[in-house]
């Protein structure tokens, strides 16, 4: 039985599985919907898949990036600052030592691929790859920018 893999609770004579949509039984894209909105003091939730959750709120929750953008926008409207404090930067040496940039830096040093191709392979934004390239050029680790003659497919 599928319910063994989920933590379950009994509530109002109905078994609620914490990793399964309360409405349709789906196990993918689970959101925890506040029965009483948090802004009104609610703290109890029920699991809903993104489709059922969007029905409750009359919105589309299937596009996660849009949800994140909306959340950030809402927080800014509330006066919260998102990101690094203004006027501060991370030291160049620390940026170049980040593990998540190691593969991109290796590809940049080979100087055989386009910026877009490196971004795609390393799953890092094109802007971040450009910043890494500028740092490597300023450190003398790679030659200055030049037109790419060997652009990978």
Image (cartoon, helix red, strand yellow):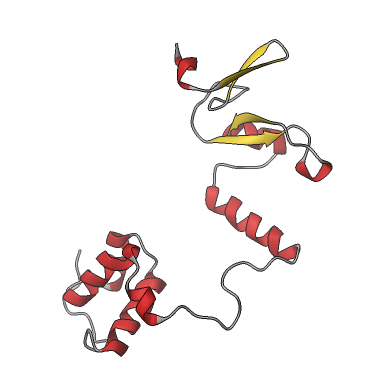
Quarter of the view holding residue 126: bottom left
Which residue is at 50% across, 22% downward? 6
Quarter of the view holding residue 5: top left
Q: Position of residue 33 (x, y in %)?
A: 67, 35
Taking depth in this image into account, of 49 and 45 the one nearest to the observer is: 45
Please state if 23 lies on the left or on the right of 105 as rendered: right
Residue 110, visible in the rendered structure:
yes
Which residue is at 50% across, 80% downward? 89
Please state if 28 lies on the left or on the right of 144 as rendered: right
Q: Position of residue 45 (x, y in %)?
A: 68, 32
Taking depth in this image into account, of 25 and 46 the one nearest to the observer is: 46
Which quadrant is the N terminus positioned in? Answer: top left
Residue 130, visible in the rendered structure:
no
Please state if 133 lies on the left or on the right of 109 as rendered: right
Q: Position of residue 150 (x, y in %)?
A: 16, 75
Which residue is at 21% across, 70% downward? 106
Which quadrant is the C terminus positioned in? Answer: bottom left
Is residue 90 shown above or below 3? below
Is residue 45 shown above or below 70? above
Q: Count numbered badges in the picture.
A: 0
* Farthest residue, direction right: 40
Quarter of the view holding residue 36: top right
Q: Position of residue 115 (x, y in %)?
A: 29, 72
Which residue is at 21% across, 88% downward? 143
Is residue 14 shown above or below 25? above
């Amino acid at each position: 039985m599928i319910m063994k893999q989920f933590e379950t609770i009994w509530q109002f004579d109905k078994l609620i599985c914490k990793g399964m949509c309360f409405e349709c039984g789906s196990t993918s894209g689970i959101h925890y919907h506040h029965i009483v909105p948090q802004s009104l003091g609610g703290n109890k939730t029920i699991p809903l898949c993104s489709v059922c959750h969007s029905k409750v709120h009359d919105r589309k929750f299937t596009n996660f990036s849009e949800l994140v953008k909306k959340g950030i926008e809402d927080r800014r409207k509330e006066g919260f600052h998102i990101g690094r404090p203004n006027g501060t930067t991370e030291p160049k040496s620390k940026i170049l030592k980040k593990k998540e940039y190691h593969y991109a830096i290796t590809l940049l040093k080979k100087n055989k691929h386009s910026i877009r191709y490196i971004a795609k392979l390393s799953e890092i934004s094109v802007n971040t790859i450009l910043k890494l390239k500028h740092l490597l050029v300023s450190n003398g680790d790679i030659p200055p920018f030049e037109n790419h003659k060997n652009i990978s497919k």
